Image: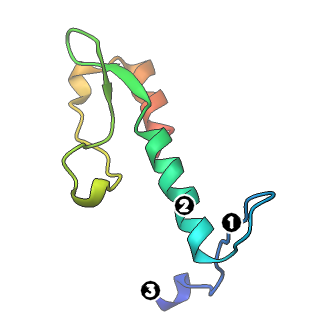
Amino acid sequence: MDRLYTGEVLSITYKNEVGTGTGPTLEFYSLLSQELKQVKFPIGFNKELVSIWRSDMPNNLLFPRAIDPSTVEPEMMSKICKYF
């Protein structure tokens, strides 16, 4: 596992805003996760548009939900898999 850690850190800075380091970086990831939660796909037998993310995670964490492959068309499943 130690070989995977490179010591590199991604740091986000917003244009025309004061602040660098973990604050803006955490804000970026928070905003990104909120946008990802808005993406919906036609899943299930009735092809209802649903989120591919679980909504019952503590602290509003981003975690994919289980999807029954038999309820999703193959081309739609490949689109979903591209998110991961």
Q: Is residue 37 left or right of 7 when viewed as pictured? A: left
List the single residue furthest toward the right. 16
The kind of residue tagged 3 is Met
Residue beneath label 1, please?
12
The kind of residue tagged 1 is Ile
The numbered mark, 3 or 1, whose residue comes first in the sequence reads 3
The numbered mark, 2 or 1, whose residue comes first in the sequence reads 1
- Image spot of residue 44 (x, y percent): 22, 18
Q: Say which element carries label 1.
A: loop
Residue beneath label 2, please?
27
Q: Nearer the viewer, mark 2 or mark 1?
A: 2
Q: Which mark is residue 1?
A: 3
Asked whether the residues under the numbered discs 2 and 1 touch, taking CB atoms below 8 Å apart as contact, a structural biologist would say yes
Mark 1, residues whose alpha carbon is within 10 Å: few (<14), some, or many (≥20)?
A: some
Q: CA distance from mark 3 to mark 1?
A: 26 Å
| Residue 74 against residue 65 in the figure, above or below | above
Mark 3, residues whose alpha carbon is within 10 Å: few (<14), some, or many (≥20)?
A: few
The kind of residue tagged 2 is Glu
| Residue 69 against residue 60 in the figure, above or below | above
**Is the N terminus in the top left, top right, bottom left or bottom right quadrant?**
bottom left
Residue 52 or 6: which is nearer the viewer?
A: 52
| Residue 48 against residue 79 in the figure, above or below | above
Q: Which mark is residue 56?
A: none
- The structure residue drawn at horizontal position 81% and vertical position 58%, both measured from the top left corner, is 16
